[in-house]
């Protein structure tokens, strides 16, 4: 008995999954095959995708003699003929639901990732292993095609749904011709009258068609583990010649990125301080071998460019950001786009720009309020970045770079940076492995607000109690202990794993910070109602 061909499409929000389903239904009907589609809405913020389930009956309508096939409304586990997804982890999620079969299902997936919220929340690198995901695809499919759909989409200037359609067409699962799919995209429009969107969709369709055909001629499976797609990277800025002459060539790329970042952040004098600090580290390493300096250069640039209200205002008011937002919402030239930014600066943000005496007085006053059971003082602000007033306010804040260097936060961060660099240079002079371990501890500094403070406190605790206080038989053992502590701090935001690791190596655990106790008034009891 002839069974319908079952297809499951998985697309994230804004990727045109509904359009793709319509194209497939139109292509099937254009070729004369009965078809039906249903959709299951997903959840926003990358916790799931909207799935579209299609069934195409592989017998031409004229051969059915007026009979109509019975279609299903949802996929059955292990009964899919084709699973197509625009995101690698989403493909693996559908496999976890039991929908794919190793002896029946053809998988077509993007090799690209849209990171989940859980992956982004990790202190360290919380990304899942792409190689393991691809291996999972291969184990649970009769064949698989893993494509770099993002690059194909950019090259064609279209949306990923057109690329997905081209990969479906080239797979040969459906008894349709290429012209049937192209007719669905054209939607009855003559070739010489196609609009820009239709032409871009056809380009994306053609690129995916060629990519799948090329993979089919190479092997039965696409091994994205052995041959990963190269990722597009921005052009590296040019390193000034006077700086390049002071460092080995192996450091020039990371130095160029660091210098460019700090020039944009504060200016030439700040760049000179960055270079001076790195020269001090380089002097502790043997000639021609500079792994400690390279690692220090990377994390030093990020720490020196710490986030504050000046930096945030600058980034949010740039023309490049406005262009990116318009691109993300797919606004046309004559569309009106309104952009609102929400801020909630508190006392620490304002105190950061004040001299130390004023900053400490203001901070103590706010802490005293918290001890009395009040919430820390903060000011919710909604700024219309699209308006003249909103943009002027942000640009005024962004211009306060001259005030930043006179503020308490700047002086405090520079003192802590110098403490870290002193530990790195001292350790590097003893052992390259120990110096490298301390330089890599710069990874702990990230984010802003509480996240930045926690990472900074963890780093300082490792410097003061593990890099110096605890006793070890050799610098190599001390370096190993520091590496373990660093990875523990990145693995557990609460710091429990770090405390355990510190105690295991003879160092004291971090001090427990005092937290205010807030007494909540008991709600008054309502009088009992008579029965």
Image (cartoon, rainbow, N blue to C red):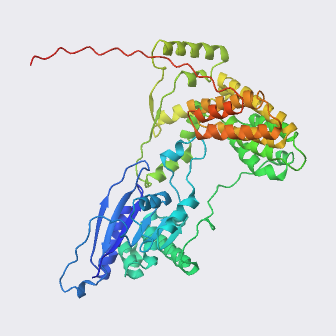
* Outermost residue toward the right in this view: 287
In the image, 72 versus 446, the foreground residue is 72
Identify whether 501 is placed above or below 290.
Answer: above
Q: Is residue 211 left or right of residue 276?
A: left
**Picture quarter containing residue 26?**
bottom left
Res 301 visible: no
Residue sitting at 46 percent across and 63 percent down? 160
Q: Is residue 389 left or right of residue 40?
A: right
Q: Quadrant where the N terminus lies? A: bottom left
Q: Quadrant where the C terminus lies? A: top left
Identify whether 91 is placed above or below 27.
Answer: above
Q: Position of residue 136 (x, y in %)?
A: 51, 63
Q: Position of residue 132 (x, y in %)?
A: 56, 60
Q: Position of residue 299 (x, y in %)?
A: 71, 40
Res 490 visible: yes
How many marks are shown on the rendered structure?
Answer: 0
In the image, 310 versus 137, the foreground residue is 137
Identify whether 238 is placed above or below 175.
Answer: above
Residue sitting at 47 percent across and 64 percent down? 158
Identify whether 69 is placed above or below 235.
Answer: below
Q: Position of residue 162 (x, y in %)?
A: 44, 68
In the image, 341 versus 398, the foreground residue is 341
Residue sitting at 39 percent across and 49 percent down? 44
Q: Is residue 163 left or right of residue 4?
A: right
């Amino acid at each position: 008995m002839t069974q319908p061909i079952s297809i499951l499409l998985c697309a994230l929000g804004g990727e045109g999954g509904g359009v793709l389903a319509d194209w497939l239904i139109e292509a099937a009907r254009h070729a004369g095959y009965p078809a039906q589609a249903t959709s299951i809405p997903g959840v926003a913020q990358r916790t799931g995708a909207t799935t579209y389930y299609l069934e195409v009956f592989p017998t031409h309508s004229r051969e059915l003699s007026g009979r109509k096939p019975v279609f299903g409304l949802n996929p059955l586990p292990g009964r899919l003929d084709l699973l197509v997804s625009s995101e690698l982890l989403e493909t693996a999620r559908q496999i976890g639901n039991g929908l794919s079969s190793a002896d029946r299902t053809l998988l077509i997936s993007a090799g690209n990732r849209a990171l989940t919220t859980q992956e982004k929340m990790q202190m360290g690198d919380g990304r899942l292993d792409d190689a393991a995901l691809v291996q999972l695809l291969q184990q649970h499919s009769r064949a698989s095609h893993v494509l770099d759909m993002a690059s194909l989409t950019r090259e064609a200037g279209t949306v990923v749904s057109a690329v997905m359609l081209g990969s479906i067409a080239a797979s040969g699962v459906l008894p349709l011709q290429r012209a049937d799919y192209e007719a669905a995209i054209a939607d009855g429009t003559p070739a010489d009258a196609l609009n820009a969107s239709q032409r871009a969709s056809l380009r994306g369709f053609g690129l995916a068609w060629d990519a799948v055909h090329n993979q089919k001629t190479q092997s039965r499976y696409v091994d994205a583990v052995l041959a990963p797609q190269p990722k597009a990277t921005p052009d590296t800025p040019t390193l000034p010649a006077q700086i390049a002459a002071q460092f080995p060539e192996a450091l020039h790329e990371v130095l160029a990125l660091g210098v460019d970042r700090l020039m944009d952040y504060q200016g030439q004098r700040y760049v000179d301080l960055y270079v001076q600090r790195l020269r001090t580290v380089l002097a502790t390493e043997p000639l021609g071998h500079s792994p400690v300096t390279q690692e220090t250069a990377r994390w030093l640039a990020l720490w020196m460019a710490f986030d504050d209200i000046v930096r945030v205002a600058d980034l949010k008011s740039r023309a490049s950001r406005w262009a990116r937002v318009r691109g993300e919402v797919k606004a046309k030239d004559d569309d009106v786009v309104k952009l609102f930014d929400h801020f909630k600066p508190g006392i620490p943000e304002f105190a950061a720009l004040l001299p130390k005496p004023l900053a400490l007085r203001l901070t103590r006053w706010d802490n005293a309020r918290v001890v009395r059971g009040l919430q820390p003082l903060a000011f919710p602000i909604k700024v219309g970045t699209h308006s003249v007033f909103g943009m002027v306010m942000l640009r005024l804040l962004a211009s306060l770079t001259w005030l930043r260097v006179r503020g308490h936060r700047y002086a405090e961060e520079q003192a802590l940076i110098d403490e870290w660099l002193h530990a790195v240079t001292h350790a590097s002079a003893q052992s390259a492995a120990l110096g490298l371990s301390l330089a890599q501890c710069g990874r702990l500094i990230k984010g802003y607000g509480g996240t930045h403070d926690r990472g900074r406190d963890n780093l300082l605790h490792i410097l003061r109690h593990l890099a110096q206080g605890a006793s070890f038989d050799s610098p190599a053992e001390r370096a190993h202990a520091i590496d373990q502590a660093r990875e523990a701090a990145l693995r557990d935001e609460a710091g429990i794993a770090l405390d355990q690791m510190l105690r295991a190596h003879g160092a004291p655990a971090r001090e427990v910070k005092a937290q205010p106790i807030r007494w909540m008034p008991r709600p008054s009891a309502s009088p009992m109602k008579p029965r």
